[in-house]
């Protein structure tokens, strides 16, 4: 019993420290902060800070900084800032960093994002999955919509309502993305490029959701704290509900503070199934 209490106390201290580090990074996204800089600032060795950060967030401090910069770039482009100016202001002199393999990417090119993605062609595929019929849709830049249900026509109708001005076509190329999502559901490491749009707040929430490790959960209030908006718990829940690519951005890993599941756009039975399955995967 004593060892369990010590272990729990250590985990709480680690969580609190990582929250402080996240806050520092969010407040200084354009700074060229190194792991050594963070270690000195918070009185811990770089090695231990890296390990604690990975345990809590599932990614490194450097990756978290990159995600914060991506979010800031999206905000600047949405406001109409010139691409080169926006990149320079967040600390980069070229576009190349945005196209590296990353769990959170801009999706569309900067020019397309800035213009709002007018004139989209949305390709889709529908097939079987362990959760029911699965629809995966994508633009030329990445996956833009994921839907699960029982009826193919309803899934397609929902997609067309989501993109009423786009040219929506069935495509064998989109089948590749559908296969990739199915592989992802089985716990395989799959690169899934995304092409999603949202408000600044939604993007920050969706970024935070991707930092929840496999097999873990966070409360809505935890996510609110992670993005620096501790009072915005209800808004976090709304952002989870408007997630266009559930399963890939794992909003099912967010539960209520009392441990109950809360809501889920794909239905609570699927949320329960996903969480149970991921706990088993993480335990292997």
Image: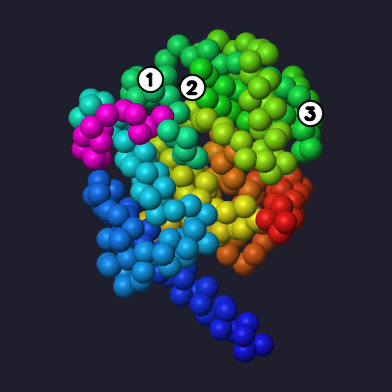
**Residue hosting label 2:** 141
Span shown in magenta:
86-99
Res 233 seen here = no
Q: Residues within 10 Å of mark 2 (few under 14, many from 20)?
A: some
Q: How is colour applied across the structure in the image?
A: rainbow
Tell which circle, 3 or 1, labels the residue nearer the N-terminal end: 1
Image point 41% across, 64% down: which residue?
A: 47
| Up/down of 32 relative to 93, above or below | below
Image point 43% across, 33% down: which residue?
A: 100
| Up/down of 264 relative to 7, above or below | above
Count how many numbered circles sit on residues in the image.
3
How far apart marks 3 and 1 lie (CA) works out to 32 Å
**Residue hosting label 3:** 128
Q: In which quarter of the image is the N terminus?
A: bottom right
Tell which circle, 2 or 3, labels the residue nearer the N-terminal end: 3
Query: In the image shown, does 135 or 174 lie closer to the viewer?
Result: 174
**Residue hosting label 1:** 112
Residue 246 lies, in percent from the top left, at 61, 38
Query: In the image shown, does 213 or 269 lie closer to the viewer?
Result: 213
Image point 56% across, 32% down: which residue?
A: 192
Q: What element carries label 1?
A: helix
Q: Is mark 3 on a helix, strand or loop?
A: strand
Asked whether the residues under the numbered discs 1 and 2 touch, taking CB atoms below 8 Å apart as contact, a structural biologist would say yes
> Residue 142 got which mark?
none
Image point 47% across, 35% down: which residue?
A: 101
How far apart marks 1 and 2 lie (CA) works out to 10 Å
């Amino acid at each position: 019993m004593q060892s369990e209490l010590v272990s729990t106390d250590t985990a709480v201290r680690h969580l609190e420290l990582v929250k402080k580090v996240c806050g520092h990074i969010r407040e200084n996204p354009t700074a060229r902060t190194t792991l050594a800089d963070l270690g000195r600032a918070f009185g811990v060795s770089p090695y231990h800070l890296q390990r604690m950060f990975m345990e809590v967030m599932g990614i490194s401090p450097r990756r978290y900084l990159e995600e914060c910069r991506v979010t800031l770039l999206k905000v600047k482009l949405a406001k109409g800032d010139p691409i080169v100016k926006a990149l320079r202001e967040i600390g980069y002199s070229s576009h190349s960093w945005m196209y590296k393999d990353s769990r959170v990417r801009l999706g569309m090119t900067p020019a397309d994002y800035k213009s709002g993605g007018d004139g989209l062609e949305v390709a889709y595929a529908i097939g079987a999955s362990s959760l029911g019929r699965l629809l995966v849709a994508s633009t030329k830049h990445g996956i833009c919509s994921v839907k699960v249900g029982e009826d193919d026509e309803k899934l397609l109708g929902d997609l067309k309502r989501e993109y009423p001005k786009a040219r929506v076509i069935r495509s064998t190329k989109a089948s590749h993305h559908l296969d990739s999502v199915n592989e992802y559901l089985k716990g395989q490491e799959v690169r899934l490029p995304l092409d999603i749009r949202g408000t600044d707040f939604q993007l920050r929430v969706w970024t935070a959701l991707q930092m929840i490790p496999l097999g873990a959960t966070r409360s809505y209030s935890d996510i609110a704290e992670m993005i620096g908006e501790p009072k915005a718990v209800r808004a976090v829940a709304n952002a989870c509900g408007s997630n266009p690519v559930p399963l890939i951005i794992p909003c099912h890993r967010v539960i209520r503070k009392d441990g109950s599941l809360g809501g889920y756009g794909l239905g609570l039975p699927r949320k329960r199934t996903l969480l149970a399955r991921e706990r088993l995967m993480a335990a292997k």
